[in-house]
Image (spheres, rainbow, N blue to C red):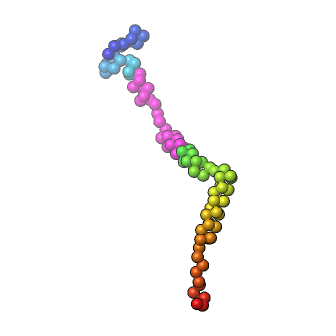
């Protein structure tokens, strides 16, 4: 392992250089609060779900009115093609 002039090449009894040992100590001393982790994950899931809902449900009044008009047009066209069927009480 080569070290630059700025980094000391001092070995500790376990064989790690002091820089590596500092990294290990820093990594091991970082405490994670699981409640914060869970809450953060839940918050991120809610934000993702909200973004999906905005895409699927976020329509303008004009878009909603256009869809309503199209549905009414389709319904009236379908009703116009229905055949009149005699009822069960009608005479022949």
Establish if 81 lies above or below 38: below
Q: Is residue 32 magenta?
A: yes
Screen quadrant of the C terminus: bottom right
Residue placed furthest toward the bottom: 91
Residue 2 in sight here: yes
Residue 18, image x, y percentages:
38, 18
Query: Can you tell which quarter of the image residue 15 is in?
Result: top left
Establish if 38 lies above or below 61: above
Residue 38, image x, y percentages:
49, 43
Query: Can you tell which quarter of the image residue 66 is in?
Result: bottom right
Q: How many marks?
A: 0
* Viewer-nearest residue: 70 or 20: 70
Residue 58, image x, y percentages:
62, 49
Instruction: Please state if 35 lies on the left or on the right of 74 as rendered.
Output: left
Establish if 45 lies above or below 22: below
Which residue is drawn at the image coordinates 60% and 88% (left, top)? Answer: 90
* Viewer-nearest residue: 12 or 49: 49
Residue 3, image x, y percentages:
36, 13
Magenta stretch, main secondary structure class: helix
Highlighted magenta segment, given as a residue range: 22-46
Which residue is drawn at the image coordinates 59% and 71% (left, top)? Answer: 81
Instruction: Please state if 59 lies on the left or on the right of 21 as rendered.
Output: right
Instruction: Please state if 46 lies on the left or on the right of 64 as rendered.
Output: left
Which residue is drawn at the image coordinates 66% and 59% (left, top)? Answer: 69
Q: Is residue 82 magenta?
A: no
Which residue is drawn at the image coordinates 66% and 50% (left, top)? Answer: 60
* Viewer-nearest residue: 69 or 85: 85
Establish if 22 lies above or below 81: above
Screen quadrant of the N terminus: top left
Residue 46 in sight here: no
């Amino acid at each position: 392992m080569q070290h630059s002039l700025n980094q000391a090449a001092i070995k500790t009894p376990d064989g790690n250089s002091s820089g590596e040992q500092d990294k290990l100590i820093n990594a091991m001393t970082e405490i994670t609060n699981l409640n914060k982790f869970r809450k953060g994950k839940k918050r991120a899931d809610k934000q993702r779900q909200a973004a999906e809902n905005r895409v699927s449900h976020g329509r303008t009044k004009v878009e909603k009115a256009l869809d309503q008009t199209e549905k009414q047009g389709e319904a009236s066209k379908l009703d116009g093609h229905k055949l009149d069927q005699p009822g069960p009480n009608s005479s022949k």
